[in-house]
Image: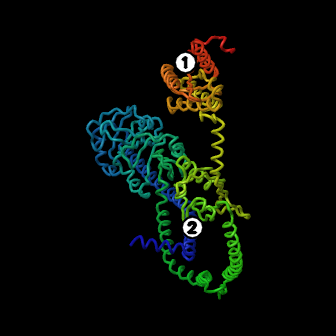
Amino acid sequence: MFLSCLSKKLSCVRTLRGQLLLGLLITLLTLVALLLGLAWQMGKTMVLETNMTHLRYEARLLADEVTQQVELRFQALQRLSTTIGFSDDPEWLNYELRHSGTLLAWFDGIVVMNRSGQVIADWPSVVGRVGLDASDSEFFKMVRGTRQPHMSEPFIGRASKIPMVVVSVPRLDERGEFAGLVGGVLSLDSGGLFNRLAKVRLGEEGYAGVATASGKVLYHPVSSMINTEVPSEAKNPLLHQALDGWQGDGVGKLVNGEVGLQSYAQVWPANWVIGLYLPSHQAQVPLAGFIRQLGWMWLVLAVLIMPLLWWILARILTPLSHLETQIGEVGRGKRQRVDLATSMQELQQVASTFNRVEDERQSLVEHLHERQAFLDTVLSAVPQGMFVANFDGAITYMNPALLSMLGISSNWTMEALLDQIHDDDRSGARDMWQYSLSSGSDFVRQLRFSRLDQEMLWLDIHARVVLLTQGGHSLGLVGVVKDITERRQQEALQRWEAEHDPLTGLLNRRGFERRLEEAFADFQKTSTPSALLMFDLDHFKPINDEGGHALGDEMLRRIAQIIAWEVRRSDHVARQGGDEFAVLLPSCTLSQAQLIAEALRQAVSEVSVTNDGKEYRVTLSMGVTSFDDHDIGIDDALSRADAASYDAKGQGRDSVVVKLPKEIDPMDMFD
């Protein structure tokens, strides 16, 4: 079911109306994408400016609030310092501190120190705090030196063990001399000074932070960051500019390495810096949501207008459907021309062009039929075999001469023809045919073809690609087939006669030496041993003299037949000339060759011919040798075998002499 629905949808897309609709939708979606992209880029700039303005305003507002809170605490401590005066009486001081409980709304604790930096009173009382010596603390030294209110650096309380700061004002005697200080302790964990910062909402990931000018973190949403060093200048250069007194905003890396919007303001009374931070992607969340909603709206709109566009295109393309119908009727022969009633100029031009092309086509078809009839007549009359093939390798036409030559019918396929080619020729012919089809090159091949009546033909095939005169396009291959069976047989006979003795049918000197060269080459490459026998006939001359050459020829034929029977089928026997013979024994050792030589000598001695009641016999004087590593060519082996044959004659004939390479007499080289 799904596949059928999918097939219908795909068929709609393949129509002109479907493609036009698809093109319109793609154009619309592309335009929407471009508009959304432009809106995104412009929106990012506007969002950046808006968020920067908001951060700048929020940072200044927070800085003003914190400044006011710090100044109020300074003023409250100064009033307390005036009230308690410069007395160091612990009871008096504790009494006054207990009656100043309203200050605990602003401080986590109040301490009074004498001029030596020792805590002499505190409220509320913390065990271990009275008596502490803070003379070496930064805030005590600063207040004693400047005699001005001071906000300390954050530190860990020695008694409470929590991070805190001390708001300090000096105590002065009647002469204006330093008499100690009054300090308000603010816990950085729970102090109300930064409650406002904790309520700041900058999206889901934006936050506010406070640091001292010296680079200590006073407030951070992550409590573990309090009282730690601010990130290095390389990680946040804008923050370090603010620590040097700069106020402003910008875009830079946050602590986690992400790019974000930053705004800084100074709290001058405390020498603090307030920073607001908003990750860039968080600032763009509203814009991304707006762009997403806008995109969905455009997509829904595009889907809704598809039926309307489909109907409009259907109305516009109705004449085109009529044109299609009429063209089909022309093709089926139901009408001669297209007659389209429409005001659309483009379709009128198409109809006019089609009518003109149809007239030309009809004229060409008539001309083509005439040429086809002429070509069929010519091909049928050609005495040579001819065929036509397309580039798929299929035979599309074979003329009568070819069908008669091969003894086949016209419905034979190329595969069937290839099956009738000789096994040794089939693979090469198939590969060459595929190469010609793919490359367009000529197919030229001589091969053996087996007819159905088992007659083997030698065929010469030459096929050439047919190209159009215009454009250079190819139509297929046209081939000519010639029967060269008689010529190949004649060539084979000529090659045989060139290397064989016509009287005995054995190899002649030329044929024997060629095979001897091949055996010597194998010996040099693979050390394959080969033996050589050379001999002539003893007592052969009386046969010619008394019985005539006819009787001598008969004796030679019988001896040739006997020798061919005695040796192996792989051995080569030759008549060198007259009554001289030679035998090449490939892959044969010298000891094996000696046994074969003795068998030949015995067999030949039993051959006889008769003339006028007289019987004639011959014997062999045979020399045997083999190839040697020191041989330069076959002449060395021939010389050794010939020398051994002469030695056999010298020893009384009818014998076999084996001659090793080292036994050659140097004088034999000059015989």
Question: Eyeballing the image, is 381 above or below 553?
Answer: below
Question: Eyeballing the image, is 666 above or below 1?
Answer: above
Extreme residue in the left direction: 127
Q: How crowded is mark 1: few (under 14 residues within 10 Å), some or many (20 or more)?
A: some
For badge 1, the amino acid type reads Asp
Which marked residue is nearer to the observer: mark 1 or mark 2?
Answer: 1
Quadrant location of the C terminus?
A: top right
Residue 306 seen in the figure: yes
| Left or right of 419 on screen, residue 201 | left
Q: Which residue corresponds to mark 2?
A: 30
Camera-nearest residue between 408 and 522: 408
The figure's colour scheme reads rainbow
- Residue 541 in picture, x, y percent from top left: 64, 23
| Left or right of 540 on screen, residue 52 | left
Quadrant location of the N terminus?
A: bottom left
Q: What element carries label 1?
A: loop
Question: Eyeballing the image, is 653 above or below 293?
Answer: above
Camera-nearest residue between 219 and 193: 219
Camera-nearest residue between 534 and 450: 534
Q: Earlier in the sequence, mark 1 or mark 2?
A: 2
Q: Residues within 10 Å of mark 2 (few under 14, many from 20)?
A: few
Q: Which mark is residue 654?
A: 1
Extreme residue in the bottom direction: 341
For badge 2, the amino acid type reads Thr
Q: What element carries label 2?
A: helix
Extreme residue in the front direction: 613
- Residue 251 in picture, x, y percent from top left: 54, 51
